Image (spheres, helix red, strand yellow):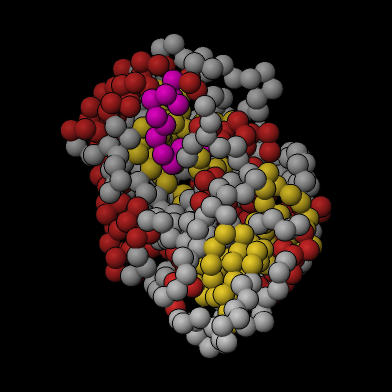
Amino acid sequence: MERTDNSGPSSGSMSGALTRRDALGVTAAASIALGAGADVAEAARKHTGHPKRRQRRRRHGASTAAPSLGTGGVPMKLGAVAALAKRIGRGEPVAIVDLAAVDQNCEALLRFAGDSGIAWRPAYKTLEAPELLAYVVSKLDRPRVMIHHLRTLAQGLPRLPSGTDFLMGYPPTLGELEAYLSTPPARDERPHTLRINVDSLELLRALDALSKRSARPLPLEVVLEIEDFRGGIVPGAELSGALQIFRAAKNRLHVGALLSYDTLAAAQGDPNWRATAAQYAQNRIREAKAQIAAEAADVIDVPKLIVNGPGSANFRNWAGTGTANEFSAGSAVLFANYLDGAGYDTTGLNKALYLCSPVLRLPAHTTGGAPAGIPSGLQMALIKAGGWPTGNNPTLSKLVQPPGIQESSVAGIGYGRGANSSGMILVPTGSVQLGDYVVETCQQVMEGQDYFGALQAAREGTVRAEWRTLKRWGS
């Protein structure tokens, strides 16, 4: 690990209030020249003046930094997506990322960041191609990423600017942590900061022991996860125990960030539910900051802490609260289906990821009519490997093109869609032919990308780049 800035990419104040300058920082990420597999071109610019004006100038200029990907345009219609898939797919399923939609989604998130003073840290797990991540990061005032799996760090580094700040949204497993800390930085490894997530005393003790023989430079940066529904250090006796360990290890472990993700906000869109989830996490953050200031101000600089809270489901409920100076929207960039639920605020967002499946069979019926259960005007079709579960429990991706497409299970017939080789659906009679593609959108965009080796980055019907997705877990 290489430290580039002890204070992190943004900072708050002792009271939790956040200045514009602290939130947005000084520009460190610069132009990106991203073609198919192209590397990141680095430059540095400094700005003065009002941060909101500074960020507006940066955003307007960011798109010109990637001429090979094109600029501007409008999100594609579903029919255009299906036509593009048929043109490029060669009969195989294909995943398409709509760059114009990504641009508009990023603009909406950056607008919130500028208006609220809460800096945006994109979530890597929802942008599972390093070039896609780099394309999004190039739009920020400085390069910052939320990372969830250590195996993806080395895959992303060559595509991101030097000095990129990675904050872990999940704690590492003990095996991941030991493997990382026992491996010296590669000779050509780009300088960066990795903030290791610690969510329990057990993990902290393991990190403390490993730091004594770390092959990575010291001190190691730590993000302390504060308790929310999914886990974390509980303010009170548990946090006191953690602070004692940090004081004893102050030359080896440095706490530069706090994280309290309002996990339950993504469970449903009901405004009262989401507001309650936000309030719980915010209260925990306030408790933790007050306790740290009282017990460990000599080893943790509370005013300079990065404080990361909400994700795509709930970030608007954090504006004006003074509790977080970062949010980590990820699903909003490609616009996951779960955000379609009533109550979520999706102003300015467009669908940007499409899973496209070719028509494999159009069964012919010679019995004098459609089989029992198929509504009039519909016919059965089978699509190739189009049953992609992309959500909890698991939820299938949503059929959206051609108009009138639906699950065969709706009519109580067939076997539905399977993820193995083919899926049975219903389409309006005559709406598709063999070789045509149907289009689906994802319940969860990270899982939707897992089925594909590459994403086709397209703008207004033209593929601009093919982006390889992350390598998966292996032996």
| Residue 315 sits above or below residue 75 on the image | above
Q: Could you tell whether 148 is left or right of 469 in the image?
A: left
Region in magenta: 164-178
Residue 119 or residue 328, whichever sits in front: 328
Q: How many marks?
A: 0
Residue furthest to the right: 68
| Residue 337 sits above or below residue 139 on the image | below
Residue 10 or residue 72, whichever sits in front: 72
Residue 37 or residue 33, whichever sits in front: 37
Instruction: Pinpoint residue 247: horizontal percent, then vertical percent.
Output: 31, 21
* Residue 329 visible: yes
Instruction: Pinpoint residue 167: horizontal percent, then vertical percent.
Output: 48, 38
Magenta stretch: residue 427 in it?
no
Q: Could you tell whether 249 is left or right of 346 in the image?
A: left
Residue furthest to the top: 213
Magenta stretch: residue 175 in it?
yes
* Residue 278 visible: no
Q: Quadrant of residue 96?
A: bottom right
The image quadrant where one finds the N terminus is: top right
* Residue found at x 65% / y 25%: 189
Residue furthest to the left: 237
Q: Could you tell whether 432 is left or right of 278 in the image?
A: right
| Residue 331 sits above or below residue 4 on the image | below
Instruction: Pinpoint residue 455: horizontal percent, then vertical percent.
Output: 67, 52
Q: Quadrant of residue 460?
A: bottom right
Q: Quadrant of residue 425?
A: bottom right
* Residue found at x 39% / y 29%: 173
